[in-house]
Amino acid sequence: MTLILQYIRTIYLSIYCVDNILLSKKHNTNTTMATYDRAKAVKEFDESKMGVKGLSDSGIKTIPQIFIHPPQTLSNIKSSSKKTTSIPIIDLSNVNSPNHRPNIIKQIKEASKTWGFFQIINHNVHVSVLDNTINSIESFHNQPYEIKSKYYKREEGQGVMYASNNDLYRTNAASWHDSLQAWMGPKAPEAEELPEICRKEILEWDLHGSKVAEVVFELLSEGLGLESGKLNELSFCESRAIVGHCYPYCPQPDLTVGITPHTDPSAITLLLQNQVQGLQVEHDGEWVDVNPVHGGIIVNMGDFLQIISNGEYTSVQHRVLANSHKKSRISVVMFLNLSKWKGEGYHGPLPELLSPEKPPIYRDFTRQEFFDNFYSKGIDTKSFVDKVKIQN
């Protein structure tokens, strides 16, 4: 508890610095607050292990400076004006029917190319499984500091980790969310490593979510004109991580974001969310709200799938607004990643999709190159896609 008290004291010193910086800008002076040390402030926040949920619960009225984003990020932070537009909703109830499957494949192909996002319903997972998963993640984040903090660490890419902002030390401005991360494959954690309060639910969702992903990959394969099992042969379901995000109430949602605009590096992502809005997708140059559909599972294309599909499917920029509601926004994300790399560890567009009429628009890349790009910076939009794009 001493760390928390020390950090809360630091917060108010930070707030004092912010107020003075804003005051000096208002009066157009060159005065700067040399006392503010961002690296030190980030380290103190991280070592407090309280996360933004702890900050929110402490009753602060002003957010610490490390969370304040620049004007270019905040200039269009608002709810969507397109109230009647949202991502496509696709019904999988007749997915195995020869009469209906072609139309479902057509819908998924179109959504994956034009939106990069869609939401599936009647996916054969009982709504209680989804609700229990979401509620258990919320219960984890609502636990007292003394219980939750023992999972707080920074070991990305393996095991079980609770932290605020995976990219905290790699980004210029932190975002208003905490996360519980569990790598479920290729090497699954021991059951005892998962927090007891959400252990059963994570294991159950991992089982059901993997099966849903296999069906989605089949449909995506057929949408590319390939055999239904082609993408599943690439073992995307074997390397997967479940991440439970908490976006607690933010007292100044106009100064920060829940998660910055980005694309996912994975092949696909499955997402569950509670009824607190905040997720937005960029479409036709505008940000569109993704409205919660009870019992729905959101699917989005990742950078990896865009590359290996040679641009037939598109990863799309998305973000989460800082939460202005008293109730926390909860989302549970399953990232599906390549497990078996070719030969010496490389990949690129699938050869089956290439021809003289459709040459590759992306070059091959190595496993090391892919992971170095992700872990060398904060989350961003298509930096790796742009890096491997063949310039004509």
Image: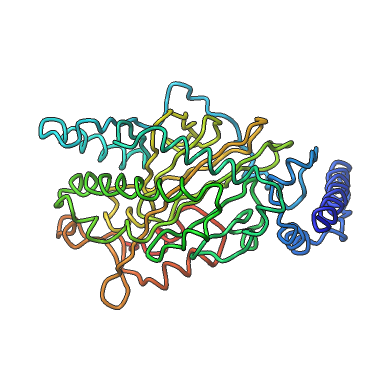
* Residue 110 x %, y %: 27, 37
Would residue 30 be found to the left or right of residue 324 on screen?
A: right
The residue sitting at the left extreme is 98
Q: Residue at x 68, y 56 (%)?
A: 149
Q: Residue at x 77, y 59 (%)?
A: 41
* Residue 249 x %, y %: 68, 36
* Residue 324 x %, y %: 66, 32
The residue sitting at the top extreme is 84
Pick the residue in front: 33 or 147.
Answer: 147
* Residue 156 x %, y %: 53, 64
Q: Quadrant of the C terminus?
A: bottom left
Would residue 113 be found to the left or right of residue 81 on screen?
A: left
Pick the residue in front: 389 or 156.
Answer: 156
Q: Residue at x 43, y 42 (%)?
A: 271
Q: Residue at x 59, y 38 (%)?
A: 321
Quarter-of-image position of residue 91: top left
Would residue 228 be found to the left or right of residue 31 on screen?
A: left
> How many labels were placed on the picture?
0
Pick the residue in front: 383 or 119.
Answer: 119
Q: Quadrant of the N terminus?
A: bottom right
**In this rendering, is residue 104 above or below 173?**
above
**In this rendering, is residue 360 above or below 334?**
below
The residue sitting at the bottom extreme is 344
How has the structure been colored for display? rainbow
Would residue 233 be found to the left or right of residue 304 on screen?
A: left
Quarter-of-image position of residue 266: bottom left
